[in-house]
Image (spheres, rainbow, N blue to C red):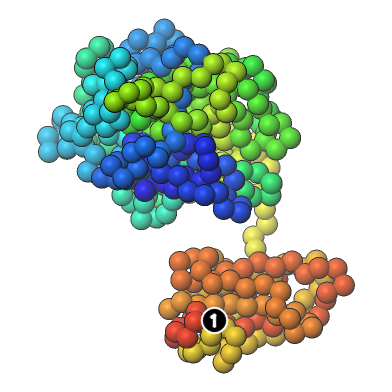
Amino acid sequence: MRHPKFGLPVRPLVGALMCTLTLTAGCGPAEEQETTKGEESSALGKKKSEVVYGTDSRQDVYAHADATLRARAQQATVALMAPSDFNATNPNNVTFPGSTLGTAYNLCTTERFRDDPTAAFCSGTLIDDDLVLTAGHCVTSASACADTRLVFNYYRPSAGTLQPVTTADIFTCTSIVARQQGTVNGQNLDYAILRLDRPATPRFTPAPVRTGNTALSVGQNVAVIGSGSGIPFKIDSGGSVRDARSGTLDYFVATTDTFGGNSGSGVYETSNYTVAGILVRGETDYVTNGSCRVVNTCTETGCRGEDITYVYPAISAYCAATGNANTRLCTGMPPPPPPPPPATTFTFSATNTNSAQRSTVNKDVALKAGQVIKLGTCTVSGATGTGDTYLRLYGPAGTQVASNDDTCGTLSYLSYTVPANAAGTYQIRAGCYSNTSCSGTVAYTVQ
C-alpha cells in the first residue's frame, strides 16, 4: 500500500483502495490514503475513504458555475500518479488506460462518474513556480518522490471528453522540501511540499495560500478540488466547517464530499479563494448495496466529517527550512530559527554487542539540566553508519535514559532533554542490533 491508514473507522483520502491498520501510539487519526496500483484486489472491502454529506455536490470542472474555482482546477490542481498510470507513447496525447471508476469499485449503475478513469492516487495544489502542496502520507520518502508524476489538465472540459494532456503537463517530483505525518508538539499534522523538476509557470498559475495562523469559523463555506477515487478533477463547493479545532490549529473538520484520491487536495475558503487546508482523511467512501457498491451518504450533521490539515504549519515549516527566502509564501512569516550548534563526532566499529548492551564504543558527555542532546548515526550533521546500528544513552547514575535502533531504516537517532536535578556525566554507547556487525560515525549536538 502506498499510504498506510492509521485508525478506525476513518479512511485515508488516497487513490484507489486502502486497508486499515490498528492505531499506534503517536500516529494520530487515520489519513486519507491510496494504495499502489495492483493492490486493489487485496484492499477491496477494507479501505476507508470518502463520503457524501447531504446532496452530492461534486461537479466536473466544466459544469461548475464559479469561474475562479474552475480556474483553480485548470491552473493550479495536479493529480499524483505513478508512471504506469498513464501512457505517454504519443507525447501530444497522453492517455489513461486503467480501470474505470465503476469497474475499480464495483459500483452500481446508479452511481455518478462510473465511466471516469481512475489514474490518480492523490491530489495536490501548485503553490509556487515549482512547488506542490499535498498530504504527507501521499509521498513518504525520496524514492516515492522520484516515482511520482504530477499531472496537470486532468479534467473534463465538456461532457464525455477529457482535456488533452501532453508530456508538457506532466512533472516529476525531485525532492520533498517539507513534510510531516504524525503528532508533533500536540498537533496532528499531515502535509508535504514537493519540488518539481522544472517550473510549472507560466504555463500554469499557483493558487494563493491563506496567511496567518488562525482558525476558520464554524459554518464557514469551503470548496475542495481534486481526484476523488482517482478520477478527473471534481469541484465540491458545498462543504462547511464543522469543527475548527481552534485550540490546536492542526486540522479542521468539514463536510466536503471527498473520496480516496482526494488526499492532498487543496481546500479553499470560498470568500477569497485561498488555500486554507489539505484534505487528509475522512469517513468511509462506498458501502455495499446488494451485489454492488454505492457512495456512502451521510446527513450534513452525521458521520465523522472530513479532516483537513491547516495550511499554515506546512508553509511555516517550508519557510523555516529555506530561511524565508520565498517572497510569495514567506512574507510576514516569523524569522527562521538559529542554525543548530556544530556537531561533535566519534567513530566506532563493533560486533556481537547484543543490541549495544556489551562491547560497545562509548563517549562521555557532560550535560546540564535543561540541555538537549541529539545524537545519531543519521539525521545529525556528520553522522554516518553501515549495518544496523544501535545507540543507548546512560545517565550519571549508570542507568539507561534513552535508546534507539531504527529511526532511519537501519540507522539510529535520538533526542533527550536533561531533567532538573539530573546534571552530570552521561555516556553514549554505540553498538549494533542483536549480534550483528556495524560501524559508522556518531554525531551529537548539545544545546
Figure quadrant of residue 325: top right
Q: Which residue does the image show at 37% across and 37% down from the upper left?
A: 45
As drawn, which residue projects farthest toward the right? 421
Q: Residue at x 60, y 18 (%)?
A: 301
Q: Is residue 266 above or below residue 351?
A: above
Residue furthest to the top in view is 65
Disc 1 on helix, strand or loop? loop
Q: Residue furthest left?
A: 90
Q: Decide: is 201 above or below 156.
A: below
Kind of residue sitting beneath label 1: Ser
Provide residue 228's location: percent of width, then percent of height.
38, 28
329 and 268: which one is in front? 268
- Estimate how packed mark 1 is, as few (under 14), some (14 to 19) or many (20 or more) residues with alpha carbons within 10 Å: many
Work out whether 43 lies above or below 308: below
What residue is disc 1 on? 355
Q: Quadrant of the C terminus?
A: bottom right
In the image, residue 56 sits, relative to residue 352, either above or below, namely above
Q: Position of residue 272 (x, y in %)?
A: 56, 17
